[in-house]
Image (cartoon, rainbow, N blue to C red):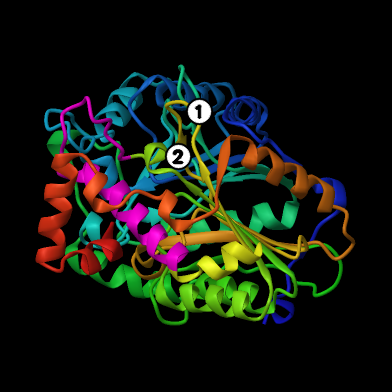
Amino acid sequence: MLDKLGGIALNADALTWLLNPVRFKEELLSRIRNAAHSIYITALYLEDDEAGREILQALLDAKAARPELDIKLLVDYHRARRGLIGKKDDGGNDRMYRRAMEQAQIAIEILGVPVKSREFMGVLHLKGFIFDDAVIFSGASINNIYLQQQDKYRFDRYHLIESVELARSMREYIKQHLVADPAVCSLTQLAECDVNPEKSDIRSFKHRLSQAQYEFTSTRIGNRVTPIVGLGRKKNLLNQTVLKLVDSSQKSLFICTPYFNPPNPLTRALAKHLRNGKKIDIVVGDKKANDFYIPPEQDFSTIGALPYMYEQSLRAFAKRQQWAIDSGQLNIYLWQHDRNSYHLKGISADNKCHLITGSNLNPRAWALDLENGLLLQDESGAWQEKFQQEQAHILQHTERLYHYSQIETLQKYPAPVKKVMTRIRRLKADFLLRRIL
């Protein structure tokens, strides 16, 4: 299947690893300043904070300097219209967008994409920063912590790909299947004349998106990159690619995911991979490196139980596969660095095929959200050393798990966490929650 996918021919020197959020931000600002004809950005959100305002102002400055520049910023419609979780008085980011456009010399298009009728049912998780003939691909959205604006960062992956055809393909997908769709609307309208998309258009939007794919001039030889998009359980090309990547691996897998909650088909594929005598390295965020972790000294809210739920999922998997941990086939690494958080996603197979993606490899990503990724196939071996260096960089702040008992049990959790998780288990709601959160 991977061979049949084909891809866009890519020179060995077309791929650059940025490795950290500081370089990522510097590259974003440089590309915005120097863009000649177009800037297309898709992200879950651009936050109303210092980093978000800096990036937005850079886009407005670029438009003012070059009015012919085609700039489109697309974010999730529902996420843009609400405040942060746990902060009831916060308004949505769309307020900032409106203020910025009212003061702008020349406005830019900021569009809200309602993948589903409610945020919990699915969001725009499409990734890509497209500048002229180059693509920066990262799972990061745009705010202080993703761009390390202050003293904390959220660790992600950051790849720069110079390719006319890849940039064109991703830009055309956005134009045809998002910008032109009646369900997608402007987030910079005046509040008093705000026009929302028709509910019927939103309800049918997921069907249209599930049929859409990237179109490009394809080759099946040499080093290449394949842009892939997926939505929903059925005929999801991105999910199928993940499973085939695991299934076709001859020796080893290197997997990054923020938390361990894989869909059942992926869990079975990983177990089969181990039974066949192959190796897996998994780098997962420690619960303290989760976005929703609440330190015991702070006031607890229900969402703070989520990292502990994921940790118990990891413990159960590690317990089932303890034999593989003992034999050295399965290496599980927990990432934690000070107060920073972990957001890496992706799979490398045999250090030859590499999927870089924003997908969390969890049931929600596989069924509800609009996800994409880039499959890099390294036929010449030109990228092997660089990917190994990236993996070593990722492993810097990790601790290897030698036995499942190193992971705490429910009984050792703080009292408020234990209370919430006990109630969830009693109601048998954990099965549902792991699929929508």
339 and 318: which one is in front? 318
Residue 380 image position (x, y, % from top left): 90, 62
The quadrant in which residue 297 appears is top left
Which residue is pictured at 12% across the width and 35% down the height?
A: 192
Q: Secondary structure at mark 1?
A: loop
Which of the image's four quarters has the C terminus?
Answer: bottom left
The quadrant in which residue 282 appears is bottom right
Residue 248 image position (x, y, % from top left): 69, 78
Span shown in magenta = 292-319
Q: Which residue is mark 2?
A: 141
The answer to whether 385 appears left or right of 427 in the picture is: right
Residue 178 image position (x, y, % from top left): 42, 58
Residue 147: image tag = 1
The quadrant in which residue 320 appears is bottom left
Which of the image's four quarters has the N terminus?
Answer: bottom right
Q: CA distance from mark 1 to mark 2?
A: 9 Å
The answer to whether 244 appears left or right of 155 in the picture is: right
Which residue is pictured at 34% across the width and 48% down the height?
A: 408
**Residue type (three-letter) at the residue carrying disc 1:** Leu
Residue 307 within the magenta-colored segment of the rendering:
yes
Q: Are marks 1 and 2 in contact (CB under 8 Å)?
A: no
130 and 143: which one is in front? 143
- In this rendering, the answer to whether 133 lies above or below 5 is above
- In this rendering, the answer to whether 17 lies above or below 29 is below
Which residue is pictured at 38% across the width and 43% down the height?
A: 287
Residue 222 within the magenta-colored segment of the rendering:
no
Which residue is pictured at 48% across the width and 28% down the height?
A: 153
